[in-house]
């Protein structure tokens, strides 16, 4: 979030942004302070009928009941600014009981925003956006306010929570023009405490709650989604990612990728050589919980071998921990010999991970938690891993339509488990269901970096990129290339290159998975263009033109 630089209307007080200038010895000014949910400031001001307020803030976490400011007692009439039912709500509207909802933030809004709130001498409460545009003005009844101290980030209501907001500045005054508090975010140097320095009383207001405020440069607390600023910083620090989804040619599914009997490092090395020749810099690989469950030591050894091979090929790795996809007939993975390919049927032998039975059986989720934390914690600061894809296409099953609510619940758990390991890499789950926009909004709200799958034509791709760009975060399309629909290399790769959107096509070498064929249907005499893949199993190119275009794009990206 950027500091707000704006001018208010004549009816509002002058904007109080980051106060530059020297503070007394022993205090260092900060751009902002941020509450993580347990902190608050007792201003000591008895806010009443002639009080004015001007504060600049950013919303960091979408959480119902999160409070920006309020009284130290529950007051149904005024002086409570709260997130409620997806909207900012100010309790104190004239003629309204118990308050008026300001529909400034839609319920599906998931991004951090910067705002300014003022309560001026005309008795009107106003909200401005980061560009200085007035969003609304609300007549208030300050005479009804009870006489109690005003708190920042908290109030005494059982309905209100300590706010997870970022405050850039706060001024409290009177209608007569007297300034009661002129708060500057600051760090007290003798004990490194973060709080507000008040220029009026020349004193430091420390946290009166639990935990500690965050300041610029402090690591985010565990369990928190990345801030918009951190996500954008990651985007600037990383290259244009262009890569592929990898299913080795001798594997019909991810059990065969990882099982001790079929794991094939020499084949993987040879396929990575093809990828390096195209200039690819990243690979997305599906893990399989069933193999891990049977032998965690072997699975960890195999995964480390895979990551080393990718590193030798200068490929960053995106592991996929879970997957709901099932194209017939299996909905649960099994160890041992896997089914043979069915001629004419793409992805015939693909299996989910951990399998639909475990998704719906909450009793198994403790074991899944151990798996997630084991894998991520071992690589949480490893530069060979560039992002964690926690769950591929949750709810995507042809066999179990009622899976949706269970998959979404497991997805939420995966984010929580992963964040508890505090990885340095971003977490994501891809948006993939245009017929289920609610799911996509949930995935976007949880993800540090926005990822999506799209197999449509050029016009649809541009539209999808626009939809994903609303979040303001770095974007990677982690599945594309479906030649029959016009989602082909000549028409689509140039769009991702031109927009700077990362892209990972499906897939590299055609093999037992038969991903050149349609999924979920029997097409024994299929004559159409290959759906996916760039090479035959003997490494002959399917389309030399495709390879030339990929090389040209990746070469240009490295210049």
Image: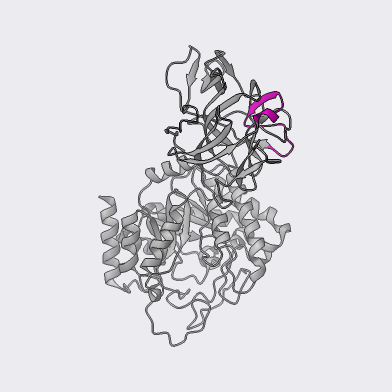
Considering every residue shown, the one lying at the far bottom of the view is 525
Q: Is residue 550 left or right of residue 40?
A: left
Q: Where is residue 249? Give x, y as percent.
A: 43, 70
> Does residue 490 sit above or below 318 in this rendering?
below
533 inside magenta stretch: no
Residue situated in front as seen by the camera: 355 or 217: 217
Q: Is residue 309 left or right of residue 138?
A: left
Q: Is residue 193 visible?
A: no
The quarter of the picture where residue 5 lies is top left
Q: Where is residue 293? Give x, y as percent.
A: 63, 59
Residue situated in front as seen by the camera: 100 or 224: 100
Q: Is residue 344 left or right of residue 407?
A: left
> Does residue 24 sit above or below 229 in this rendering?
above
Q: Where is residue 460? Give x, y as percent.
A: 41, 66
Say which residue appears at 72% left-offset and 58% top-offset. 362
Q: What span is colored magenta in the figure? A: 142-160
């Amino acid at each position: 979030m950027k500091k707000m630089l704006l001018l208010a209307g004549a009816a509002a007080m002058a904007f109080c942004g980051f106060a530059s200038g020297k503070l007394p010895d022993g205090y260092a000014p900060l751009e902002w302070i941020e509450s993580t949910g347990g902190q608050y400031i007792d201003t000591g001001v008895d806010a009443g009928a002639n009080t004015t307020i001007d504060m600049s803030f950013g919303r960091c976490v979408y959480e119902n009941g999160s409070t920006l400011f309020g009284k130290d007692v529950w007051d149904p009439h005024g002086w409570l600014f709260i997130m409620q039912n997806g909207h900012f709500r100010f309790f104190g509207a004239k003629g309204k009981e118990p308050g008026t909802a300001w529909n400034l933030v839609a319920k599906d809004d998931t991004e951090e925003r910067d705002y300014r709130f003022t309560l001026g001498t005309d008795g009107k409460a106003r909200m401005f956006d980061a560009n200085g545009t007035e969003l609304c003005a609300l007549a208030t009844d300050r005479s009804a306010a009870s006489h109690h101290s005003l708190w920042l980030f908290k109030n005494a209501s059982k309905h209100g929570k300590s706010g997870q907001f970022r405050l850039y500045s706060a001024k409290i005054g009177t209608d007569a023009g007297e300034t009661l508090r002129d708060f500057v975010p600051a760090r007290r140097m003798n004990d490194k405490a973060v709080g507000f320095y008040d220029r009026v009383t020349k004193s430091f207001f420390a946290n009166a709650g639990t935990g500690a405020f965050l300041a610029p440069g402090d690591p985010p607390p565990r369990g928190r989604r990345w801030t918009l600023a951190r996500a954008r910083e990651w985007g600037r620090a990383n290259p244009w990612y262009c890569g592929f989804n990898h299913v080795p040619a001798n594997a019909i599914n991810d059990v065969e990728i990882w099982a001790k009997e079929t794991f094939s490092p020499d084949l993987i090395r040879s396929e990575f050589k093809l990828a390096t020749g195209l200039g690819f810099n990243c690979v997305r690989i599906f893990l399989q919980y069933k193999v891990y469950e049977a032998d965690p030591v072997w699975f960890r050894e195999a995964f480390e071998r895979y990551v080393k091979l990718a590193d030798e090929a200068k490929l960053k790795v995106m592991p996929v921990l879970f997957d709901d996809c099932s194209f017939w007939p299996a909905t649960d993975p099994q160890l041992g010999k896997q089914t043979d390919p069915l001629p004419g049927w793409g992805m015939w032998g693909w299996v989910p991970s951990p399998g639909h039975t475990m998704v719906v059986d909450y009793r198994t989720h403790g074991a899944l938690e151990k798996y997630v934390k084991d894998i991520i914690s071992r690589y949480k600061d490893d530069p060979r891993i560039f992002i964690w894809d926690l769950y591929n296409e949750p709810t995507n099953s042809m066999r179990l339509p009622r899976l949706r609510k269970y998959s979404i619940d497991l997805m939420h758990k995966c984010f929580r488990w992963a964040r508890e390991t505090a990885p340095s890499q971003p977490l994501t789950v891809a948006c993939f269901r245009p017929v289920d926009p609610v799911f996509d909004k949930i995935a976007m709200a949880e993800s540090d970096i926005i990822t999506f799958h799209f197999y449509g034509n050029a016009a649809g791709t541009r539209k999808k990129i626009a939809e994903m760009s609303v979040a303001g975060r770095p974007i990677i399309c982690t599945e594309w290339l479906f030649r029959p629909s016009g989602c082909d290399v000549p028409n689509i790769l140039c769009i991702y290159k031109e927009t700077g959107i990362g892209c990972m096509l499906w897939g590299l070498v055609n093999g037992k998975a038969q991903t050149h064929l349609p999924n979920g249907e029997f097409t024994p005499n299929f004559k159409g263009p290959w759906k996916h893949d760039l090479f035959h199993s003997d490494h002959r190119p399917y389309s030399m033109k495709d390879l030339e275009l990929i090389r040209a794009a990746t070469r240009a990206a490295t210049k």
